[in-house]
Every structure is written in structure tokens, then in C-alpha cells.
Amino acid sequence: MAKTDIKEQLPVLVAAADVLFQDSEFAGMPMVKMRGDSMEDALFDGDRAIIDLEDTDVSQGGIFALFDDSAKLIILQVTPVHGSRGRRILCTYANPRYPPFELTLGTEARIVGRVVHKFTRYL
């Protein structure tokens, strides 16, 4: 699937970040609104996360947006599972109330991109 197709599938797309913040660094990157408490203290309910669709390499881990097997967009901490040759990822939430789980890339999940910036509504 092409990168432009991913943009069309983002159901919670707010706007291209460069339109709202007039910052060329974020040109063409989608921004999504966080919902829920699963990523607290990294991302809070109501925060806006900017996603770099070009950065889908999970080999070093990080916070990524991905589509699960039900085409639901989720944002979480991703770490490659040792010995899986990049096919399995360990998914953890910043909030310890939610248990970690593993997914297989390509069948159970598809990486959308790395979360590269956030705008928070809290002072």
C-alpha cells in the first residue's frame, strides 16, 4: 500500500501539521488527536501527535502509530522482538495499567509511522 493511501485511511486525521502550525518541518505529516489514557505520561488524552509517514523502521524502537488487524489506528511504544528478524514487535503502553502484547508485522499490524512530535493541551 502506498504512503498516500495511509493518509486516506487515517480516520482521526485532524489536519496536516504544517497547515495548523505553518512549520515546514512538519510539511505533509498528519496529526492525530490522542484519546484515552493508555500512553500517559508520554501522550495525554487530547494531545496531538504528529506522525512521520516516512519513518517506519522499528529496528531501534520508539513510539509509533500502527494499524492493527482490525484497521484500528493505535499509538504505542514498539520494540522489535529479538530473533524475529523484524517480523514480531513487542507493543507496550506508557501507562502500566495496560499489559504489553506482541504482534506480527504484515499480518496483525502495519506500521504507519513514527510519532515525531506532540502538542499538549496541558500547561
Image: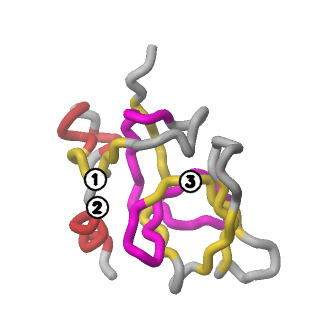
Q: What span is colored magenta in the figure? A: 44-73
- The residue singled out by tag 3 in the image is 76
Q: Which disc number belongs to residue 12?
A: 1
What's the distance in space between the residues labelled 2 and 1, CA to CA? 6 Å
Q: Marks 2 and 1: CB-CB under 8 Å? A: yes
Residue 11: x, y in percent? 26, 59
Residue at the far left in the pictured view = 19
Depth check: 97 or 50 in front? 97
Quarter of the figure with residue 5: bottom left
Q: Residue 10: image x %, image y %?
A: 29, 61
Give the distance between the C-alpha atoms of the residues marked 3 and 1, in whole angstroms.
16 Å
Name the residue that disc number 2 marks. 10
* Left or right of 82 on screen, residue 35: left
For the point 43% across and 35% down, which residue is it? Answer: 45
The one nearer the camera, 37 or 119, is 37
Above-or-below relation of 61 to 4: above
The image shows residue 23, relative to residue 90, as above or below, that is above
Query: Could you tell me residue 52's position as x and y percent?
Result: 41, 54
Badge 1 amino acid: Val
Query: In the figure, 84 relative to 60: above or below?
Result: below
**Secondary structure under the numbered disc 2 in the rendered image:** loop
Query: Is 20 left, or right, of 39 in this rendering?
Result: left
